[in-house]
Image (cartoon, rainbow, N blue to C red):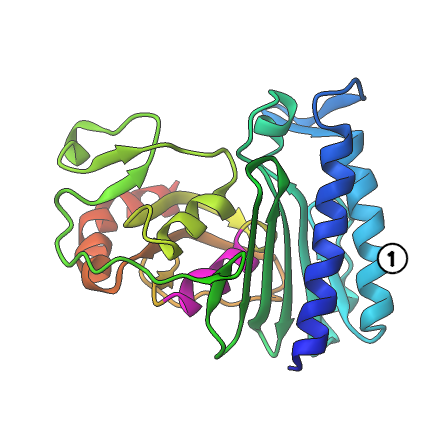
């Protein structure tokens, strides 16, 4: 994958971030796609802009986005754009900064370019497979923690069983939480529910290229461009605590899958 393509994707994501930021804090239509699942007209505007611009870059690539009706034709594509036009819509609607435009290019089931543009935080994250991860112009590296107890976790609250962990500020965007692990601002992010590929594709590459270990909640490798476009949870950690985190979460994860 050439730098030229990654540069072009980064420029498109930055333009999408500017489009979203221009509407941030203004009056626009908002509704719920389902109970507790908000969306707004800005999501749709950014989605349309991204689809037009990214499809022009790679006309042969498939398309998967939170705000576009899925089409099985993408499964036959070797390359796929995986997009969340505004990851962290709740924070966007509340005029908080914890949201980002998320763009990933998947090739043969793996992310090869991952971009997060978070204009309200003045942050631009970028990763290419085999080329490292960056926030702005600075290369980022995961922390060296090798003990789960005391690990920093973006959270609003912790269950009693996890009170030995350390809470840090939690943006609504799961992608930004994963990026915090990449940048050594957190040591672990874990979810124990079914989630969609567009939530994590770009951030997964950012974290992996920064040296983090990323899996589903059961410790299994993530795959992309799957028929359901889903995985059971995500676990992004420093390499030294991943196995211990999988073990701690195992019973809860198995119980959640069974439900």
Instruction: Relative to 244, say whether 16 is above or below.
Output: above
Q: Residue at x 71, y 35 (%)?
A: 21
Judging depth in this view, the residue of 9 and 137 nearest the camera is 137
Indicate whether residue 90 is drawn in magenta. Answer: no
Instruction: Relative to 255, say whether 111 is above or below.
Output: below
The image shows a total of numbered marks equal to 1
Q: Is residue 55 left or right of residue 129?
A: right
Q: Position of residue 55 (x, y in %)?
A: 83, 65
Magenta span of residues: 200-210
Q: Position of residue 173 (x, y in %)?
A: 52, 39
- Report crowding for label 1: few under 14, some 14 to 19, many 20 or more residues within 10 A (C-alpha): few
Judged by its main secondary structure, the magenta piece is helix
Q: Residue furthest front?
A: 137
Q: Is residue 123 left or right of residue 213?
A: right
Indicate whether residue 201 is drawn in magenta. Answer: yes
Task: Name the quadrant of the C terminus.
Answer: top left
Q: Position of residue 254 (x, y in %)?
A: 30, 49
Judging depth in this view, the residue of 4 and 209 nearest the camera is 4
Which residue was labeled with disc 1?
52
Q: Residue at x 36, y 65 (%)?
A: 220
Q: Position of residue 198 (x, y in %)?
A: 61, 53
- What secondary structure is found at the residue carrying circle 1? helix
Q: Residue at x 77, y 29 (%)?
A: 23
Judging depth in this view, the residue of 53 and 250 nearest the camera is 53
Task: Name the quadrant of the N terminus.
Answer: bottom right
Q: Residue at x 80, y 21 (%)?
A: 28
Q: Is residue 8 left or right of residue 91?
A: right
Where residue 140 sits, quadrant-wise, is bottom left
Judging depth in this view, the residue of 148 and 73 nearest the camera is 148
């Amino acid at each position: 994958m050439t730098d030229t393509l990654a540069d072009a994707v980064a420029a498109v994501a930055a333009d999408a971030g500017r489009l979203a930021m221009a509407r941030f804090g203004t009056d626009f239509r908002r509704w719920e796609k389902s109970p507790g699942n908000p969306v707004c007209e800005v999501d749709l505007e950014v989605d349309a802009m991204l689809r037009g611009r990214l499809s022009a870059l790679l006309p042969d690539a498939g398309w998967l986005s939170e705000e576009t009706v899925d089409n099985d034709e993408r499964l036959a594509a070797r390359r796929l754009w995986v997009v969340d036009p505004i990851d962290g819509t709740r924070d966007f609607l509340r005029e908080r900064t914890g949201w980002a435009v998320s763009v990933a290019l998947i090739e043969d089931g793996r992310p090869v370019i991952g971009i997060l543009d978070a204009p309200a935080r003045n942050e631009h994250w970028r990763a290419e497979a085999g080329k490292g991860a960056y926030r702005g112009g600075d290369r980022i590296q995961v922390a060296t923690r090798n003990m789960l107890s005391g690990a920093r976790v973006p959270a609003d609250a912790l269950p009693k069983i996890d009170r030995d962990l350390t809470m840090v500020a939690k943006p609504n965007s799961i992608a930004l939480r994963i990026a915090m692990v990449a940048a050594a601002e957190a040591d672990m992010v874990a979810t124990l529910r079914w989630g969609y590929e567009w939530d994590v594709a770009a951030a997964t590459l950012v974290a992996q290229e920064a040296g983090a270990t990323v899996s589903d909640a059961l410790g299994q490798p993530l795959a992309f461009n799957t028929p359901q476009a889903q995985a059971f949870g995500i676990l992004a950690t420093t390499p030294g605590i991943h196995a211990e985190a999988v073990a701690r979460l195992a019973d809860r994860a198995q119980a959640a899958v069974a439900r």
